[in-house]
Amino acid sequence: MLTDIYCKDTYGLFETSIVQQTAFWSEVKKKLGIESIAIDFKCQKEYLKQDQNVPHDIQSDVLLVIQRLDRNHCIAYVPYGPELSPQQEFQGRLLEELSESLRPFLPKGCIMIRYDLCWESLWAKDKSYYNEKGEWNGPPDKKSQELRFNFNTQYWNLFKAQTNILPSNTLYLNLKPSTEDILGQMKPKTRYNIGLSKRKGVEVRHAGIDELDVWYELYKETAIRNGIYLH
C-alpha cells in the first residue's frame, strides 16, 4: 500500500489547509521545545477514496510531534494526520502499515503512536446512528470502534483513545429556532453557566490583534484556575 518512505526536513512538508500538519506547526512546537519529524511516503491509488481521482500513486507526508514522557520514553503524536483519505475498508490497514513504516524513524524509547484523525467517521452515513430529527448521535462504544478499525489489519493492534485531544467531529448548530428553544436543548449545566455569565457581566465580542494581550491574560487566568497546561 505504501512505498518510498523516507524522513525529510520539516520545512519540506507539503502545503495543506490542516495547520497541524504544516511546517509552521513544526516551528511553533520547536519554539516550545518540542521535537517533530516529517515523513514522506507514497500511497497506491486503489486504496484511496474514489473522489480522490488521481491517475497514479499519490505522494503525501505526515508530521509527527514527539512528546516526552520522561528521560527515556516518549510518544509520537500525529495531529490531524495523515491527510490522505483511504476507502473505509482500508482505514485500519493504512494506519497499521504507516505505523510500522514509521517505526525506524522514531526515537529509541517511543512506546506508541497516537493519531487524532481528520477522516469522516465510519458511522457518519449509518442511518441507525441518527435520531428522529436527523441528528447524528455519535459513534458507538469504544470496543465497537476498535473492532471496526482493526478490520483488514494484520496485528489487531489499534486502540481507541479514552479522549480526543483535537475535535473529532464538526458540530452544526441550527440557529433558526428561538433562543429559548436552543437553550432548552442544552444540558442544565450549560444553561446554568450561560446564565451565570450574564449575571457576572461577561460580554463576548470580536477583537482585533491589538487586544491579543487582553485575550492572553484571560486565557492564562482560566488555565491557572482550571489546572490546564499553559502555552
Image: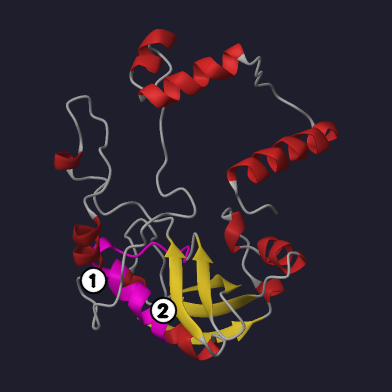
Q: Residue 55: where, in percent of width, then height?
A: 41, 70
The residue at the point 41 percent across, 79 percent down is 98
Quadrant in the rendering for residue 145: bottom left
Identify residue type, mark 2. Answer: Leu
Where does label 2 land, which residue? 98
Q: Residue furthest right?
A: 210
Q: Is residue 136 left or right of 102 when viewed as pictured?
A: left
- Circle 2 packing at 10 Å, graded few (<14), some (14-19), many (20+), is some
Residue 81 - label: none
Q: Does the magenta-highlighted stretch encompass residue 7? A: no
Residue at image coords 27%, 31%: 135
Q: Which residues are magenta?
A: 82-100
Work out which quarter of the rendered image holds the C terminus and state it.
bottom right
Location of the N terminus by quadrant is bottom left
Question: Which comes before the other along the chain, label 2 or label 1?
Answer: 2
Residue where numbered disc 1 is placed: 150
Residue 52, relative to residue 150: is it above or below?
Answer: above
| Residue type, label 1 | Asn
- Tally the marks: 2
The way the protein has been coloured in the rendering is secondary structure
Q: Is residue 178 visible?
A: no
In this view, the residue in front, 85 or 76, is 76
Residue 54 against residue 201 in the figure, above or below: below
- Give the SS element for disc 1: loop
- Asked if the magenta segment contains residue 89, the reply would be yes
The percent coordinates of residue 40 (x first, y second) are 55, 79
* Viewer-proximal residue among 71 and 88: 71
